[in-house]
Image (tube, helix red, strand yellow):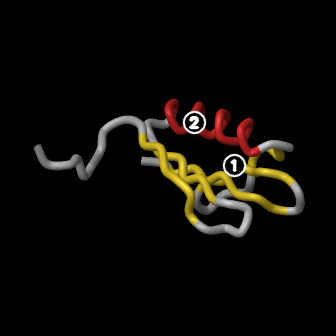
């Protein structure tokens, strides 16, 4: 499962993947999240959204969940 991250750097929002360079360079967080969700859906992965200060905000998961909740 591939993970994507929306992060803020140098005045722009970027979509990153583990071990790879940033993609995009969006002026608004909403556009970066929309594109990140699209990429995560295609990869059956997840999207982790971070705040401007780098702390965790939310996560969206797509595809098979390796740790589904009980009952």
Q: Residue, x 88% and y 62% (percent of image)?
A: 10
**Residue toward you, 1 or 48:** 48
Image quadrant assignment for residue 24? top right
The answer to whether 51 is drawn above or below residue 69 in the figure is below
Residue 53 position in % (x across, y down): 71, 69
Give the residue at the far left of this rendering: 71
Residue 20 position in % (x across, y down): 66, 57
The answer to whether 38 appears left or right of 35 in the picture is left
Of marks 2 and 1, which one's residue comes earlier in the chain?
1
Q: In which quadrant will I find the C terminus?
A: top left
Say the numbered circle drawn on residue 45. Answer: none
**Residue toward you, 42 or 50:** 50
Q: Label 1, on which residue? A: 15
Crowd class of label 1 (few under 14; some 14 to 19; many from 20; radius 10 Å): many
Residue 21 position in % (x across, y down): 73, 57
Figure label count: 2
The answer to whether 14 appears left or right of 10 in the picture is left
The answer to whether 7 is drawn above or below residue 62 in the figure is below
**Residue toward you, 13 or 40:** 13
The answer to whether 37 is drawn above or below residue 52 in the figure is above
Q: Residue, x 59% and y 53% (percent of image)?
A: 49
Crowd class of label 2 (few under 14; some 14 to 19; many from 20; radius 10 Å): many
Please, what secondary structure does the residue beneath circle 1 have? strand
Please, what secondary structure does the residue beneath circle 2 have? helix
Q: Residue, x 70% and y 57% (percent of image)?
A: 7
Residue 12 position in % (x across, y down): 84, 52
Separation (CA) of disc 2 from disc 1: 10 Å
Q: Residue, x 74% and y 45% (percent of image)?
A: 29
Mark 2–mark 1 CB contact (< 8 Å): no
Q: Label 2, on which residue? A: 37
């Amino acid at each position: 499962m591939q993970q994507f991250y929306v992060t803020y750097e140098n005045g722009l929002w970027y979509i990153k993947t583990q071990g790879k360079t940033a993609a995009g360079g969006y002026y608004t967080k909403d556009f970066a999240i929309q594109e990140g969700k699209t990429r995560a859906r295609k990869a059956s992965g997840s999207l982790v959204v971070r705040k401007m200060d780098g702390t965790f905000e939310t996560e969206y998961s797509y595809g098979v969940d390796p740790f589904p909740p009980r009952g």
